[in-house]
Amino acid sequence: MTSEKGPSAGDPTLKRRIEPWEFEAFFDPRELRKEACLLYEIKWGASHRIWRNTGKNTASHAEVNFIEKFTSERDSDSPISCSITWFLSWSPCWECSKAIREFLSQHPRVTLVIYVARLFWHVDQQNRQGLRDLINSGVTVQVMRVSEYCHCWRNFVNYPPGKEASCPTYPPLWTTLYALELHCIILSLPPCLKISRKRQNQLTFFRLTLQNCHYQTIPPHILLATGLIQPSVTWR
Ligand SMILES: [Zn+2]
């Protein structure tokens, strides 16, 4: 049943929601807003209770702020396992990736899953290596899909009364392109996605440039999912 009251009713663990315009400004995959926004969930042990909160960049990046807050509030020797899920508007930079790995090595009972709306300076080799190191150390990193956008809208956004199901939708192509580029990062391939922003009209352009190594290494179904590649047909 759709609530007529608004989102805060029935969610006692909720600390703070962001406004709908903020969600769109931060998480639209076509927007390249400089600041990052972090929406996070923490679940302890076998409990079904989920703690939610949000964070943004301050003088430090949102990821570092989370780590400092988490560490200052809790004992690193806690015997209880903890599952953390992040929804980040930008993927972590290499310095944050390093800080996250150090944090997880100090908290071996913590698992982390990261969903990202966009890849931060993804052509930078250090950022690419940082993400690879993060994934190799056991962190799950995925690009946000429709289901994650809807989840965030319901649980982290102060949506208008009766608008629980009105999550903004974006053309799936952007998500697919970011997912493809993340695949390139994981496989240590050169970047195939170029992103540019036109100052005059503030439009963001995505250009896909595939080299032989991409065709040879990336599973065909991932390339075909972009809709920009035609399946090859053999005529007899
Ligand atoms: Zn960072």
Image (cartoon, helix red, strand yellow):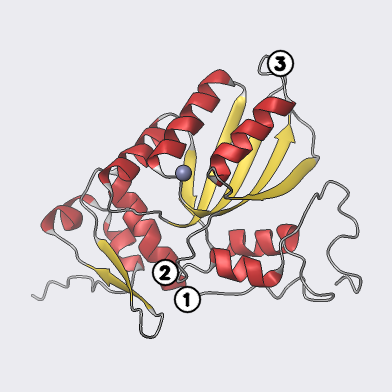
Q: Quadrant of the C terminus?
A: bottom left
Disc 3 designates what residue?
Answer: 79
- Measuring 55% from the left and 64% from the top, which residue is drawn there? 27
Question: Looking at the image, do the residues carrying marks 3 and 2 touch, with CB atoms under 8 Å apart?
Answer: no
Give x and y (percent) for residue 70.
67, 31
Query: Where residue 33 is drawn, which disc sits there?
Result: none
Residue density around tag 2, few if under 14, some if 14–19, many if 20 or more, within 10 Å: some
Secondary structure at badge 3 equals loop
Disc 1 designates what residue?
Answer: 171
Question: Looking at the image, do the residues carrying marks 1 and 3 touch, with CB atoms under 8 Å apart?
Answer: no
Give x and y (percent) for residue 222.
33, 59
Disc 2 designates what residue?
Answer: 174
Q: Amino acid at mark 2?
A: Trp
- Measuring 29% from the left and 63% from the top, which residue is drawn there? 223
Give x and y (percent) for residue 156.
72, 58
Q: Say which label, 3 or 2, has the lower sequence index.
A: 3
Q: Quadrant of residue 199?
A: bottom left
Q: Amino acid at mark 1?
A: Pro
User: Is 150 situated left or right of 201 in this image?
Assistant: right
Secondary structure at badge 2 equals helix
Q: Is residue 225 above or below residue 191?
A: below
Question: Looking at the image, do the residues carrying marks 2 and 1 touch, with CB atoms under 8 Å apart?
Answer: yes
Q: Is residue 96 above or below residue 165?
A: above
Give x and y (percent) for residue 134.
42, 35
Q: Amino acid at mark 3?
A: Pro
Marks 2 and 1 sit apart, C-alpha to C-alpha, by 6 Å
User: Is 61 situated left or right of 120 in this image?
Assistant: right
**Which residue, as the protein is rendered here, is positioned at the far front?**
59
- From the viewer's side, name the closer residue of 59 and 148: 59
- Measuring 33% from the left and 50% from the top, which residue is drawn there? 183
Q: Quadrant of residue 121?
A: bottom left
